[in-house]
Image (tube, rainbow, N blue to C red):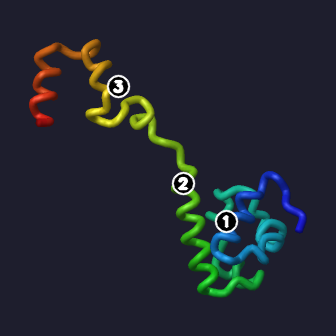
Amino acid sequence: MLMEQDTQWLYHLLAEVQLERFYLRVRDSLNITRVEHFAYVKESDLEQIGISKPGQRRLWEAVKNFKISVRPKSWMAKARPLHGAPEWRSGLRHCVSPWFESRLYHNRL
């Protein structure tokens, strides 16, 4: 099977739900080359290329999980580590007063 580098994710996604035999049909007939393209696919499109209803349900669940797994972290998660992490406490001294830092420490106990 000829697999393009850009759509390897699609093959692996389909293989995860045992639908890898539909790879060429999904890629070529439905023109799916990015996960965002699934937003424009209808159930009738999947039926037309031969994917059964149970297969469609497995595929939609896999697409949802794939989107979650590749979703970038929010900027807040990147900007501030988890509360109570050592690197957060060490940087705290430079940002807030000693009184506020002691309040945070005592409230955690």
- Mark 3 against mark 2, which lies toward the viewer? 3
Q: Quadrant of residue 54?
A: bottom right
The local crowd at label 3, few if under 14, some if 14 to 19, many if 20 or more residues have their Cα within 10 Å, is few
> For the point 70% across and 79% down, which residue is it?
46
The local crowd at label 1, few if under 14, some if 14 to 19, many if 20 or more residues have their Cα within 10 Å, is many
The disc, 2 or 1, on the residue closer to the chain's N-terminal end is: 1
Circle 1 sits in a helix, a strand or a loop, which is it? helix
Position of the N terminus by quadrant: bottom right
Please determine whether, in this image, residue 89 is positioned above or below residue 29: above
Instruction: Name the side, left or right, on which 47 lies relative to 100.
Output: right
Say which residue label 1 marks.
13
What distance separates the C-alpha of mark 1 from that of mark 3? 37 Å
Image position, residue 30 (x, y; %): 77, 69
Depth check, front residue: 57 or 103: 103
Image position, residue 90 (x, y; %): 30, 20
The disc, 1 or 3, on the residue closer to the chain's N-terminal end is: 1
Image position, residue 45 (x, y; %): 71, 78
- Mark 1 against mark 3, which lies toward the viewer? 3
Identified by mark 2, the residue type is: Ser
Instruction: Name the side, left or right, on which 64 lies relative to 22.
Output: left
Please determine whether, in this image, residue 76 is positioned above or below residue 71: above
Instruction: Name the side, left or right, on which 78 lies relative to 39.
Output: left
Depth check, front residue: 31 or 60: 60
Circle 3 sits in a helix, a strand or a loop, which is it? helix
Identified by mark 1, the residue type is: Leu
Q: Which mark is residue 66?
A: none
Say which residue label 2 marks.
69
Say which residue label 3 marks.
87
